[in-house]
Image (cartoon, coloured by chain):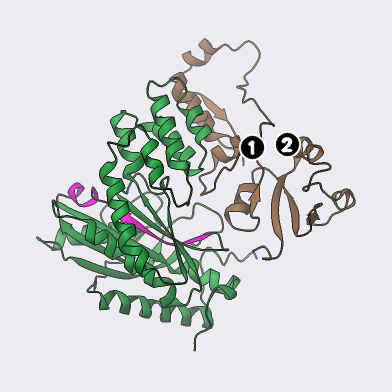
Chain colours: A green, B brown
Amino acid sequence: MAVRTPHFPDLLFGSAARLRRWEGILMDLLTANGYQELHPSLVLRESVPEGAVRFFDGEDLVALRWDFTMALAGLLARSFPQPPERVAYAGAVFRRPVQPWEAVERFEVGCERIQPEGESSAEADVELARLLMAIPGAIGLKSAILHLGNAALIRRPLEVEGLFGGLADAVVAALSRRAPHRVREALDGHPSARQLTAHAEALLSELDGPGTLAALASSPYAGLLEGEREHMERALQSLLPILPPNLELRVDLADVAGLDFYTGPTLRLWAPGAQQEVAAGGRYDRLFPGLGRPWQAAGFCVRLSRLLDLADTRPDLFEQPQ
Amino acid sequence: MSSPSILLIAFPKGRLGDELIPKLANTPLALDPLALKSRVLRIPTATPGVAVLLLKGADLPRYVAAGVASLGIVGSDTLDELDMDLLELADLGFGACRLSLCAQAGVTFETLRAKPHLRLATKFPKATEAWLTRMDLTAELVPPE
């Protein structure tokens, strides 16, 4: 009989102990920074999203918790007239895998910073980046790369040009591949093709180099995106002096991961040499207004399942615990 | 995971591979002809420390996304069909292909438009869906088993 362990991971002694230890370390780190734990129910009874693991409880179709951010948003919108500023979570989510090697059950630890609409969000974004910067050292990952991006750099020009649906998706897919020639192909014949292709070339012209942010100046949308550029520059000025020695900070202007969800700054943490994103997050200011709450929010999630896989397959990437 | 001391590149089998491998003769990525005829998994190249995996086109992006190979060469149609976090470093300018719509002899486009229900078998659901949208047609897509 075939055993498909990656889909439904059973954690043996070493991995189980590592999961327990990492969850503890990360939740202690978040608590020390003022984040309070919330634990939304494992079973969703309201809306059952696509991609969730679903089953019948009697006559009711229910689903297992498939995402902490969405589950927490429902809980917060229902339970609090004013948002708690900082919340944290730890546990498992269950999702039908997109790739055959992905597990259905995934372990995560994460946090969210929530504010009423209209408050300045710059400090909250930097606070989350600083927390994420502390995570590789906390769990013994010898080195990591933190990518700073901003979903608005792509969202806003597309919105200004009235580009939605399949064409916008094609542009985003081309940008995700870092392929400006595909952006040109996708927009062939569109009235905004020249401006948007020039913008894509500006976003992709200085990948990870010292002039990455300056490259925005050559975009036809430089004026439109001046606020975003200033925000990223200020974040870099705050973060670079406190960069731990094991962490590399890079600016990724063309980060389009989760573009349908994120509205502003994005964060992605990578383990070098492993081609694995081990944490991701960003600002998603449209989530709570969609639930009837005038709040803005940002957060990140550490993908402990990927880190556990890495610890098994690439133990050389981790410090050995004392 | 690939060994850190070997750079593994995934090459496509089939028509694209047949076109690619002769292009690489006498270059640093030329494949060892003896290994190519054998059943070895990793085919050495003319550059020490660089080896090649020969894979089916549809499998190739998965190997790169999973970190088994560090990079690969594949048709853009294959990449278009897969939702994977991969970078397209360069368009190598060969391997052009054409996606064709097949029907029984005598069937015209107007005949298809007049049918209340169309079933279309395809290995390229995303490209087909985009074409159907452009043509303002609705069809049930049947992926091959």
Residue with the mark numbered 1: B75
Q: What secondary structure is found at the residue carrying circle 1?
A: loop
**Taking A204 as reference, is B98 left or right?**
right
- Residue stretch in magenta: A276-292
Among numbered discs 1 and 2, the one appearing first in the sequence: 2
Looking at the rendered structure, whether the residues under marks 1 and 2 are on a common chain is answered as yes
**3D distance between C-alphas at marks 1 and 2:** 8 Å
Tell me which residue sits at (32%, 55%) in the image.
A282
Task: Look at the image and tell me whether residue A57 can be seen.
Answer: no
Chain of residue at mark 1: B
Q: What chain does badge 2 belong to?
A: B
Report if residue A147 lies within the magenta region.
no
Q: Position of residue A138 (x, y in %)?
A: 41, 77
The residue sitting at the left extreme is: A81
Q: B100 or B116, which lies in front?
A: B100
What residue is at 16 percent from the left and 58 percent from the top? A115
Q: Which residue is mark 2?
A: B16
Depth order, front residue of A191/A122: A122
> Quick one: A79 or A321, which is closer to the camera?
A321
Helix, strand or loop at disc 2? Answer: helix
Q: Is residue A152 visible?
A: yes
